[in-house]
Image (tube, rainbow, N blue to C red):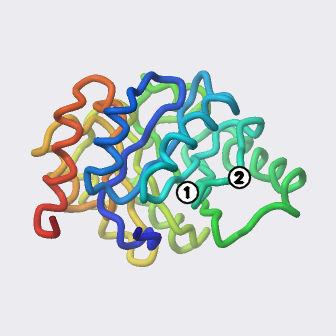
């Protein structure tokens, strides 16, 4: 298993509130993707997190919990990703929730397993955008957020999230030019192998999520599309 996040190219993101058959999960975990991220916005409970974790653990693949609910945190994951929503209009989503987590869980935290993500959410229709009260940044804003993620906050991950809609490849290209040490994740609207290849030209890691539930076969094909030289 490859636990070096800066060497990942492709990950699947699974929503524990959505249905996934054992056969589908096996195909995802054995597809050649670099990791499975478990996370979502609505309907996240400790029970459905644990159920999906148990099922993924049957396979030799890194498993990540992206934390959205403090009450749904469980041991047993390889990594814990903690979002900092850079374009939120509320300090709560950048600092306050993280502060609360530190107060409650500091003694149990293994910082070799925890990574902060600088999130920039660009789809106003997305549940995550609305829940975290984001403002829609322009191109210059987004590029500046990426610069801040690396040079001010020194974050290991900058995540450009279009959440269900396909983003602007030219903007993704420009963002990639701002990042050298910070690993660049792109997620949003990747439903075809061609789209996966296009965004992978610029992002270090592409995240495929919604299409798993809308067009499973096409989602699977995104792995080979970006890792064809290595499979």
Which residue is more in the foreground, 100 or 65? Answer: 65
Q: Nearer the viewer, mark 2 or mark 1?
A: 2
Quadrant in which the N terminus appears:
bottom left
Looking at the picture, how far across and down is residue 203, in whole percent?
A: 29, 60
Secondary structure, mark 2, is loop
Which residue is more in the foreground, 89 or 37? Answer: 37
Which residue is more in the foreground, 159 or 67? Answer: 67
Q: Which mark is residue 106?
A: none
Name the residue beneath numbered marker 1. 117
Looking at the picture, how far across and down is residue 50, in whole percent?
A: 63, 37
Name the residue beneath numbered marker 2. 75
Looking at the picture, how far across and down is residue 22, in whole percent?
A: 39, 32
Q: How many marks?
A: 2
Q: Of callouts 2 and 1, which one flags the residue occurring earlier in the amino acid sequence?
A: 2
Secondary structure, mark 1, is strand
Residue 193 appears in which quarter of the rendering?
top left
Residue drawn at the location 16% of the way across and 43% of the way down: 221
Question: What whole-number distance in Å separates the C-alpha atoms at marks 2 and 1?
Answer: 19 Å
Quadrant in which the C terminus appears:
bottom left
Mark 2 closeness class: few <14, some 14–19, many ≥20 residues within 10 Å: few
């Amino acid at each position: 298993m490859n636990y070096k996040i800066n060497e990942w190219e492709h990950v699947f993101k699974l929503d524990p509130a959505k249905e996934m058959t054992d056969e589908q999960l096996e195909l995802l975990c054995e597809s050649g993707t670099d990791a499975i991220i478990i996370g979502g916005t609505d309907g996240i409970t400790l029970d459905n997190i644990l159920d999906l974790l148990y099922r993924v653990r049957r396979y030799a693949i890194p498993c990540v919990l992206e934390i959205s609910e403090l009450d749904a945190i469980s041991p047993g994951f390889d990594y814990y990703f903690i979002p900092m929503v850079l374009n939120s209009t509320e300090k709560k989503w950048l600092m306050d929730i993280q502060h609360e987590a530190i107060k409650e869980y500091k003694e149990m935290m293994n910082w070799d397993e925890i990574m902060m993500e600088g999130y920039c959410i660009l789809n106003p229709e997305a549940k995550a955008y609305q829940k975290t009260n984001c403002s829609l940044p322009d191109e210059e804003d987004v590029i500046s957020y990426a610069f801040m993620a690396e040079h001010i906050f020194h974050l290991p991950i900058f995540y450009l999230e279009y959440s269900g809609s396909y983003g602007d490849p030219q903007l993704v290209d420009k963002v990639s030019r701002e990042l050298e040490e910070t690993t660049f994740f792109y997620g949003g609207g990747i439903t075809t192998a061609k789209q996966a290849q296009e965004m992978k030209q610029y992002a270090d890691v592409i995240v495929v999520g919604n299409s798993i539930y809308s067009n499973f076969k096409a989602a699977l094909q995104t792995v080979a599309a970006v890792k064809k030289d290595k499979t």
